[in-house]
Image (cartoon, rainbow, N blue to C red):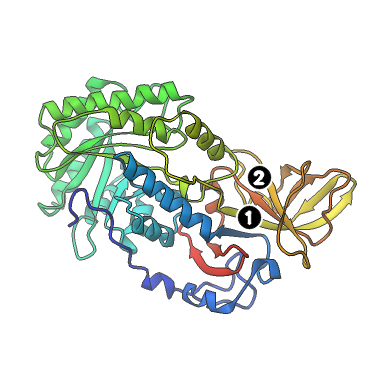
Amino acid sequence: MLAADAPLPRLRLGALQALPFDGLTKGLPFGAGGITPAQVAARGWNLLAGDLPLPAAVIREDILRANSRWMAAFTAANGLRIAPHGKTTMAPGLFDLQAADGAWAITAATAQQVAVCRRFGVARVLLANQPVGRETVEFLVSCLSGADRIELYCLADSAEGVAALATATAAAPPPADNPLRVLVEVGVAGGRTGARDHDAALAVARAVAAAPGLELAGVECFEGILPDAAAVERLVDAVVAIARAVDAEGLVAADRPLVLTAGGTAFFDRVGERFGAARFDRPVLRILRSGCYLTHDTMGYARAFARIRAETTLTLPEGGLEAALEVWALVQSRPEPGRAILTMGKRDIGFDAGLPRPVRWFRPGMPGPAPMPEGHEVVALNDQHAHMTLPDDSPLAFGDMVAFGIGHPCTTFDRWQLIWLVDSRYGVTNALRTFF
């Protein structure tokens, strides 16, 4: 097993790179069925040359790698670790990049996501959810044993939740050196799951510590649904207070570090500041679970990062996070003045954090994509169409290509089984398979 504070080893991606894409996969050039990710680069495809059917989802590889390096440098400079949320991308190829840059674990939200992680060699998984249901709990316990066993953390916020886990570990005891590690989940009134007060959380911690096959690992929260920095700070401070009480009672094994972890979404700076200020007389792992940093966005997370730059007391490395994920579409029609219809809709791009924004356009013969002029705006999405209003002097014409920036990367990733990695000239370098 891994040392408690060791980063993840690299994943086992040989089978994934050799797994062919079905010819009916959305985004794959027609007639290219059976190609594997390992064979993609040799084809010499280029999005701007028209080699890919549109719409297509692409990730700029140079920006992607810079974002990953930036977060690694940020966490290292501030005494933090990262267990990035795999649900954002569900792409093992990207999990491997995060492992290469020092991730402590990959975070999952469901048992199916845990299964994907285990299949491709993620050695440590943090299930940021309270398991429920016999089939799910028994599967998770089975992941602790065998040749492909993993180190697994999950959440509990009630005596009933602890009892469900303990029932499964009693029926199929995990190895003594690999118990099911449990984090007490702390929540807020009106929020999602999580113990609502100090005493309730401490009772859960005691129940975990007393249950055979379970090991209390620490305390957890998710702050992403909270409205402002002050609310985030109150919740994180409550986590620290509960962790102090847990430590005072000796509920976490003396030879294991105490884990403090939070989502680290739009307020990862405030989480890092509060965790960093908490002092314990024992080793502590202070873990963020941010996932969207890897591709970032042009909307909500971009605004959040601008606030972090302006307000944080933490050390920020050179550079910063930039949007790497784009969805490209074609102008299909200019049916009336001031309006264009494009070949991209709700089935292709997320819209829960705001309608996508046109950021670049391209026409064959241009030296490269040009910034989208002011006044171009998506005003509606149908299943397969985007409605965009245009200024009178818009250069867009039938057949032009348009790149769209997105908000909340999660809900664009989950629309694609195939996402292309491209270089700065939009040449295809690899194909990422997702598992939603």
Crowding near pointer 2: few (<14 within 10 Å), some, many (20+)?
A: many
Check the image and report above or below for 29 versus 359. Answer: below
Give whichever of 306, 110 is nearer the camera.
Answer: 306
Look at 40% across and 51% down and name the residue there.
86
Q: Is residue 182 visible?
A: yes
The residue tagged with tag 1: helix, strand or loop? strand
Which residue is painted at 51% across and 69% down in the image? 430
Q: Residue 132: horizontal and vertical position, in percent?
A: 31, 41
Residue visible at 38% across and 34% down in the picture: 314
The residue wearing badge 1 is 327
Count of marks, rendered view: 2
- The quarter holding residue 419 reads bottom right
| Pointers 1 and 2 in contact (C-beta within 8 Å) | yes
The percent position of residue 75, horizontal first and vertical second, equals: 35, 43
Name the residue located 68 percent from the left edge and 49 percent from the top edge: 359
Tag 2, which secondary structure? loop
Identify the residue under disc 2: 356
- Please indicate whether residue 311 sits to the left or right of residue 57 in the image: left
Going by the image, does 379 lie left or right of 270?
A: right
Asked whether residue 193 appears in the rendered view, the answer is: no
Measured Cα–Cα span from mark 1 to mark 2 = 9 Å
Specify the quadrant of the image occupied by residue 407. Answer: top right
Image quarter where the N terminus lies is: bottom left
Amino acid tagged 1:
Val
Circle 2: residue type: Pro
Label at residue 386: none
Q: Is residue 20 above or below residue 303?
A: below
Corner quadrant of residue 231: top left
Precedes in sequence: disc 1 or disc 2: 1
Crowdedness of circle 1 by 10 Å Cα count: few (<14), some, many (20+)?
many
